[in-house]
Image (cartoon, grey):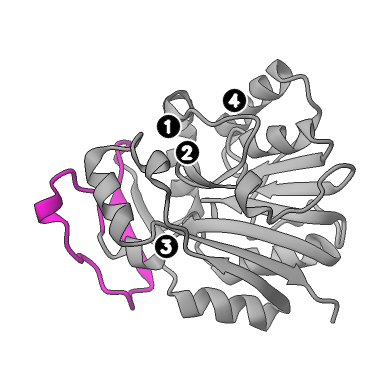
Amino acid sequence: MSKENIKDHWNLIALEYQKKRKLSFDEIEYAPGYARESELKLLGEVEEKRIVELGCGAAENSITLAKKGGICTGVDVSLEQLKYAKNLIKENNVKIELIEGDIENLTMIDDAVFDIAISTFALDWMQDLNAAFKEAYRILKPNGIFVFSLQHPIYNLLGAEHTNLKKLKITVSYFEKEVTFVESTGIDLRVHASKISDIINGLIKIGFKIEVILEPKPLERDILPHEEWFQEVIKMIPSTLICKVLKVPK
């Protein structure tokens, strides 16, 4: 499957997807409704730091960071997502550079220009996760940090989300390299499925130093807003994997 399928998918659902989301512009959430930056403190001081959001969607995280004084750039493959982002940026009266591009191939960005890279639930859509890691490493300054979250590989084993808890079961092999699914757009999507070891070893091989790996369990207050089936699942298994890594100069 070509990357064009993923691009077409997001262009088709961008408006509907963003209307359903209720993200704050005062907080970064690394997991759905929890694992907040104000609690985890992974980014450190952001004022006057050059920050790139990889797979920014509607740029909610970039807007949040720009409000805190960050000098932000958002990159996304979907032009429709970026159009939505442009409106939100204007509404929030901040300045953010937006780039339409593939985060596995950021040729439009020079080497070593950012202090911080952040990505939330965008790396799940990569065809080549290590290529995205390499580009993040390249565009970061020496000792720059990269914080990202993605769907936990163990959570992925449940396959499609199911509202009947009794029918939840392991539906795919942990060792499969690709996951295929069809969403409401009818577009056949095939995305890279990473094992935890793939993620860790990929980061180390590229030259990142792993500082923090988190598999957060939500607090009770954070569970309640979710649908009942998801409440039960995230009490038992992690839905999200969060990593903070440092670019060690070679």
Quadrant in the picture for the N terminus: bottom left
Looking at the rendered structure, which numbered label has been put on residue 13?
A: 1
Query: Which residue is pictured at 41% across the width and 60% down the height?
Result: 191
Give the total number of marks visible in the rendering.
Answer: 4
Query: Which residue is pictured at 54% across the width and 56% down the height?
Result: 149
Q: Amino acid at mark 1?
A: Ile
Query: Which residue is pictured at 66% across the width and 47% down the height?
Result: 101
Quadrant in the picture for the C terminus: bottom right
Q: Which residue is mark 4?
A: 84
**Residue 185 is drawn in which quadrant?**
top left
Query: Which residue is pictured at 59% across the width and 32% down the height?
Result: 58
**Which residue is farthest right?**
48
In this view, the mark in front (2 or 3): 3
Disc 1 element: helix
| Pointer 1 with pointer 3, Cβ within 8 A | no
Disc 4 element: helix
> In 3D space, how far apart are the residues under numbered discs 2 and 3 (Cα atoms)?
21 Å
Q: Where in the figure is residue 178, as x and y percent of width and height?
A: 37, 67
Q: Earlier in the sequence, mark 3 or mark 4?
A: 4
| Label 1: few (<14), some (14–19) or many (≥20) C-alpha neighbours in 10 Å | some
Disc 3 element: loop
> In 3D space, how far apart are the residues under numbered discs 1 and 4 (Cα atoms)?
12 Å
Q: Amino acid at mark 4?
A: Tyr
Q: Which residue is mark 2?
A: 10
Q: Which residues are magenta?
A: 159-186
**Front-most of residues 164 and 122:** 164
Q: Earlier in the sequence, mark 1 or mark 4?
A: 1
**Which residue is farthest front?**
220
Q: Earlier in the sequence, mark 2 or mark 4?
A: 2
| Label 4: few (<14), some (14–19) or many (≥20) C-alpha neighbours in 10 Å | some
Looking at the rendered structure, which numbered label has been put on residue 152?
A: 3
